[in-house]
Image (cartoon, rainbow, N blue to C red):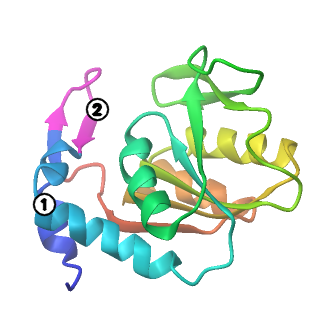
Amino acid sequence: MIFDEFSIKTLIRPVIDFPKPGVVFRDITPLFQSPRALRMVADSFIQRYVEADFSHIGAMDARGFLIGSIIAYELNKPLILFRKQGKLPADVLCEPYQTEYGQAYLEVHTDSLCEGDKIVMFDDLIATGGTLLAAAQLVRRMGATVQEAAAIIDLPELGGSQKLQDIGIPTFCLTAFELTER
């Protein structure tokens, strides 16, 4: 199946003024309701990473879980969950970060990764990069490295992809939206 960025993009619904006035939320649920589109998204990531040298898939709470779990299953890699504060039951490492909406905290189990592990991290989109930057800090605190940060959507005007690249983490996104795009 050939990846079609245009058809993927048309299935990402803009929700104006959510979660607060002035924000255009990029809703991926219509994309997940289309078996063809979901397969195109998953297959695109699988083709990119099937022969790559890494040991784990990381998925960001919560929409990153959707695509990260599919890719981990298809590539037979362990799945590491990066959760919002207070959601993990065992010993955790915690990292604060800024979102478009304020400060938050990201956690991961302390035994998730070991020195020398290499992880590809997944989220639904890269906006300011806060979640993925916090996850990268947690990965580094465990002695592992981030191979790449991947997402369905990039919002390049918010600078998250650039911030990740500035600290040596390559990014890969299937499509991008300008802030004014409806």
Q: Nearer the viewer, residue 134 or 115?
A: 115
Q: Nearer the viewer, residue 12 or 107?
A: 107
Regarding residue 154, the answer to whether it shows in the image is no
| Residue 165 percent across, percent down from the top left | 66, 64
Residue 177 vertical position relative to residue 92 in the rendered view, above or below:
below
Disc 1 target residue: 35
Give the Cα distance between marks 2 and 1: 28 Å
Give the residue at x 22% y 73%: 5
Image: magenta residue range:
15-27
Give the residue at x 73% y 42%: 112
Disc 2 target residue: 23
Which is more N-terminal, label 1 or label 2? 2
| Residue 31 percent across, percent down from the top left | 17, 53
Please name the amino acid that badge 2 sits on. Answer: Val
Please name the amino acid that badge 1 sits on. Answer: Pro
Q: Quadrant of residue 120?
A: bottom right
Q: Nearer the viewer, residue 134 or 35?
A: 35
